[in-house]
Image: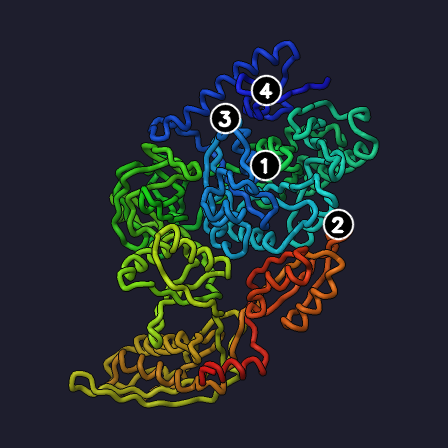
Amino acid sequence: MISRHPYLTHAGGLSVTPVSALYKRPISLCKLNPSSITQRTTQTWKQRTSRHYATHRTAGSRSTPQTSIDKVRNIGIIAHVDAGKTTTAECMLFYTGQTGRIGDVDDGDTVMDFLEMERERGITIQSAAISFTWRDHRVNLIDTPGHVDFTVEVERSMRVLDGAVAVFDAVAGVQAQSETVWKQAQRYGVPRLIFVNKMDREGSNLDSTVQSIRGKLGGNPLKIQQPIGIDSHFHGVVDLVDMKVIKWEGRDGENVVVEEFSPESVDKVTHKKSLEARAELLEALADLDEDIMQVYLEQGDSGVTSDMIKGALRKYTAELKCQPVLCGTSLKRKGVQQLLDAVVEYLPSPLQTTQPKATDKDNRPVSVTPKKEAQMVALAYKVIHDKFRGIVVYFRVYSGTLKSGSTLLTSRGQKERITRIYEVNAQDLVERESIEAGDIGAATGLKTVATGDTLLLMQDANREVKLEGITVPAPVFFCSVEPLRTADEKALEDALHNMQLEDPSFRLTHDQETGQTLIGGMGELHLEIIRDRLLNHYNVQANVGSIFISYRTCVNGCIEESRKTFHEMVGGRKQSAGLTLRLEVGERGDGNTFHDEGPTSLESEVNLDRQQVVDAVWAGTKSALDRGVFGYSATDVTVTLVDWELDDTSSVAAIRKCAAQLCGMIMNGDNMDILEPVMKIQLSCSQEYVGSVLSDLTNARRGVVHSIDAEGETDRIIHGSVPLKQTLGYSTALRSQTQGNASFTMDFEEYKVMIRTDQEQLKKKLLTGV
């Protein structure tokens, strides 16, 4: 039997709300006979319209009901830039009744990308959160950026997710930023669904994308849909779990047709591939689940029910052992409803996901249980400065209940009081009385809370709990900033302070030698956005200097033991210390390390214990390594304490100063190498330009090519590494070389020793200024 579910119309014209969204259940479960469709859907449309307008009319309402925690889904959408994250999110909002139309990234009218800069550039810059209901489940959705410069936005969002939808381009497959966000999800133990988007594009290939996910990302993607039609003829899928055929008809898939899978419902090729894909799915699940294996071996395909498959997919997705794969095209409104069904069916609730790592005041592991009656523990995962509300803190409650007006204690010892609590709806905030365990919300009134802070109720101060923080990469680009007028100094200082609270990857430093204020970011675009926000959001007139790169230094071998004796008069009292240190190159990427090979005991006249001496030596050497040489900090250096000469005039301050001076003296420049940041680059261009692009990349820019992959019939993907310095202005050069038919993305790879000729030139410039 074929069920047709056209989009509904009303007096205002064409509505684009499918029946599945109105009934909050998958289309395949709608059991409507033709005579009942009109009456039932008309009633539901009126209910939906009333709810839609009420959401906007009662923006300040406190009456939003709480949802049972087992029906909460905290999910994110993660992907490479331009894979279709925001378009997919916009479709979700439309189908769930949150919006009356689907926003378009190109038109700059999306709900999720609400910042003016995002709409102008057509990219997501900061993560946006919104809540909606689907099949009686509350879904908190976070749309994240895909550009590498805003990786920290993904990082802090990932920290509070229970599941994620990883969106992949059906033509490009796994791309550079796809790998980055996948690793972030893996690091935080976030279960994933996979949505292969853009199935209507020429060269799209679901199987190839699945293979690249398995090969490049080490995932275990399990197809639960088989596409019907290829490229522009893509018009449906075979549901491999329920064995239903789902087709979208009309220009934008506005008519959804569901029927039983049979040789008559699809073409011969699709029928054969669907049976093969179903068998592959069952075999993969049998490898994971003993019950399915036993039934499958004894009774074959027919013995394994759809409920058994769904239960296994739910269990092993939550355990990170597989990732269900769906496909569609968000731009053409095909497949997103089934994706929503999969979100509530397969991704875990806060009760089913791995609980967060937490410690007590003695750094011992403690359990944080998602119960609303338990001690309140929340994590601030994002801070923004709103022109009208001031500082807004986004948080997730892991246990207990956070109420409006509560007094909080942060993990940094700050006492704060919440004035209002909100449910998050992108740029709109709906006021609530409280947020319970497992849910995400926002709060105002918190002046000093920073990203990564654990929030406790003041009454629980004696039961200290600290959640695992958020990993923030070090910036690689810097530039100077100064107020245009003296009168702007305070405004600039306040703006930079607020931006530090908002963006953990934004660094603010003061150069003691030049007196300049330096700002650091993850890339050219990141610093450009910071500059735009200073001028347009904070209305601060400032001069922003040219971008320069954050180099580092390291010893170029083993430096023999060096000795120094320190003497100084402090307050009329002599202080002295003598130390012997050895410096040598450590393992690349391990950072600076300290080894203690000093004497096992101290002379009796020394008024310090041994640990105080060792700690003072390490503190002094660490400060010297942070200063480095040529203005660049030293890294991957192993410092060994060999010997000391101390007496009754030795103090902690004297030892620390002696260690710092000795370490600085050893690093004299001649025995130090300069390290430069190297980026992993992924470049897409037409085949006709591959030769010139490779020549420029490997010769002029000193890059290394790792591989070249085909993308469709005419395009190629070049994977390689290139020094960050060589990428400055590369966008313009690449457009010129390829007549605009190329693009590239980058991700930080590692610090490497700069080639000798470049080192000498840079050292000369730093020493002479020429």
Question: Quick one: label 4 or label 3, which is nearer the N terminus?
Answer: 4
Q: Position of residue 82 (x, y in %)?
A: 60, 47
Q: Quadrant of residue 282?
A: top right
Please say if the residues under marks 4 and 2 sit with CB atoms less than 8 Å apart.
no
In-front residue for pair 505/360? 505
Question: Vertical placement of 266 versus 111: above or below?
Answer: above
Left or right of 498? Residue 698 is right
Q: Which residue is mark 4?
A: 8
Residue at position x 72%, y 66% from top?
692
Q: Which residue is mark 1?
A: 314
Left or right of 230? Residue 723 is left
Q: Which residue is mark 3?
A: 136
Q: Quadrant of the N terminus?
A: top right
Assign a secondary structure to mark 1: helix
Question: Quick one: label 3 or label 2, which is nearer the N terminus?
Answer: 3
In-front residue for pair 265/185? 265
Question: Quick one: label 2 or label 1, which is nearer the N terminus?
Answer: 1
In-front residue for pair 758/175? 758
Q: Nearer the viewer, mark 1 or mark 4?
A: 4
Q: Which residue is mark 2?
A: 712
Question: Quick one: label 1 or label 4, which is nearer the N terminus?
Answer: 4
